[in-house]
Image: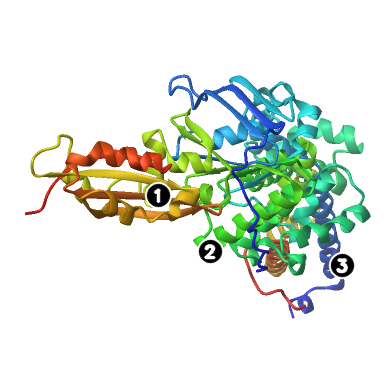
Amino acid sequence: MNALPPSADFAPFEVVTKAPAIRLERLGKTFDPAVGPVLEDVSLTIGQGDIYGIIGRSGAGKSTLVRCINNLERPTSGRVLVAERDITALSGADLRSARRDIGMIFQHFNLLSSRTVAGNVALPLEVIGLSRAEIDRRIPALLDLVGLADKAKSYPSELSGGQKQRVGIARALATDPSVLLCDEATSALDPETTEQILSLLKDINRRLGLTIVLITHEMQVVRDIASHVAVLERGRLVEEGATFDVLAFPKSPVARSFLSGLVAHELPPPVERRLRSEAGPDTDPVLRIVFSGDNAHQPIIADLVHRFPVEPNILFGRIDYVGDRPLGVLTLALANGEAHLPAIVAHLVSLGLFAEVLGHVVRFA
Amino acid sequence: MLFGLLSPALANLLLESLTQTAVMVSVSAVLALVLGLPLGVLLVVTTPGHIFTRPLLNKVVGTFVNLIRSTPFIIMMVAIIPLTRLLVGTSVGTSAAIVPLTVAITPLFARLAETAMREVDRGLIEAAEAIGATPFQIIVKVIIPEALPGIVAGVTVTLVSLVGYSTMAGTVGGGGLGDLGIRYGYQRFMPEVMLIVVVILVVLVQLIQFAGDRAAFAVNHRLARRRRVS
């Protein structure tokens, strides 16, 4: 498998005002009125060149959502605009031509077993009516792009999962679309292959300026690649924003639970059980501190000890990287800290950190 | 050898019957494939939720197919004599037998092809839709090629059934091996003729099955395997 050049210059969180590539306006979808809506009132704007992650549990409606973008699923209400064109209003030949600007890859790859790798990549080109010679001319570059130049004559059954998804990507990019939809594209792959496919997507995003919409139930995928993320729960949009912000300060319980194991927002149960809401004579305050970006490198524990007569005790913590930006979450118990709590919080905030009192723990005897 | 038992006249008769069977089977097989595949496609794609949903058409065609399939062949041969006369100008002989054979076998092949094409993963069809393929392109480039191993297996079953049906062609003067077996082996008490007829039919069916299995394997790329050298 070909290694891709490292993309150190990838910076997904720049705030740039770009023309929207995709806009969802109050999107709704109901399959069976007795069951209720699968999607309800979802509005989103996806900027040109963004890698937009949509995360949700199974049954949250995320797959339906992405399939509404190319009208594989017709929404029951609302509109989908791709490049300012209302996809929902199209049908027949107009819809087919609009779909050629929207590539799609799938969890189970959906390659034709009857065709070779080259044949699979040729399919969209045949569909738009290119000549055999023109198709043969374009295939090598596409296979090269996904690192499968030597597999042109292989059948999908002879490939690994990661290679199959690469074929899927080459096929999706064949007609030079401006948007790529990924429906759980890495969910059937092992972690190492997932990483390779994600870095390929990132690379393509950077090189071709392609807008990528990515459906997943894995927060790692979002952390590793997405510039923006939307959290979907029971068909509704519960949270949305730049990936770093959502990871650092998740607002919804769903987002928090997705982040457990990734960012240390939720306390481990043994610590959680010892937590009281009221301070007492025998308790220590528990503080959560979120570092992001540059201030992640500050020696804040030493600083606290230095300034206040407290003894910080680390209960739980983790530092992660989102893109190349560090994100740390640290939960401290401050022995002898009750009296100084307001001053400590004020001090931390003045350093540009996010600090929050979670509760109080009874001091160990 | 068995053929040594036969007089030259009988041997000639046998050759003639074999030719008649071969003609009846091959001509009606070709017609059944040409007519049955589109019929099978129609049965698949007009199903509700498929790429060319037409529930009423689907019901009508399906019922029609079942109607023909439930008619015993021996009755069908006689029942469609007016149609036969209209198409080939006569109701007797080998070419007259081809009409009922084709009418009887086409729905069988259509159903076999339908079953094979229904097995094609919805995901593949969806991928083709996402690419912007037309229903016709999806049929020609995705459904039929992906179902090909199953369709080839259906052709094999169709051919074997045709060999069986063709033995009844004597009813309308179509001749063939079955007719020979009945007239000489049974009615003239020549068990050796009957035996030869049965042996030839068995060999014929074995050959068809063998060739069909080979062909189905050759077009199947679903499973990883070593490329065949030959």
Give the chain letter at badge 1: A
Task: Say left or right for B84 vs A234.
Answer: right
In the image, are marks 1 and 3 on the same chain?
no
Which quarter of the rendering shows the C terminus of chain A? bottom left
Q: Position of residue A83 (x, y in %)?
A: 74, 30
Q: Position of residue A57 (x, y in %)?
A: 43, 40
Work out whether B85 lies above or below B102.
above
Q: Position of residue A166 (x, y in %)?
A: 67, 58
Reading the image, the residue beneath label 1 is: A263
Whether residue A262 is visible, yes or no, is: yes
Crowd tier of the residue under label 3, counting other residues whose Cα lies within 10 Å: few below 14, some 14–19, many 20 or above: few
Which secondary structure, mark 2?
A: helix
Reading the image, the residue beneath label 2 is: A192
- Tell me how far mark 1 sits from mark 3, CA to CA: 89 Å
Work out whether B19 lies above or below B103.
below
Q: Amino acid at mark 1?
A: Val
| Residue sticking out furthest to the left | A365
> Could you say which quadrant of the image residue A301 lies in?
bottom left
Mark 2–mark 3 CB contact (< 8 Å):
no
Q: Which numbered disc covers residue A127?
A: none
Reading the image, the residue beneath label 3 is: B12
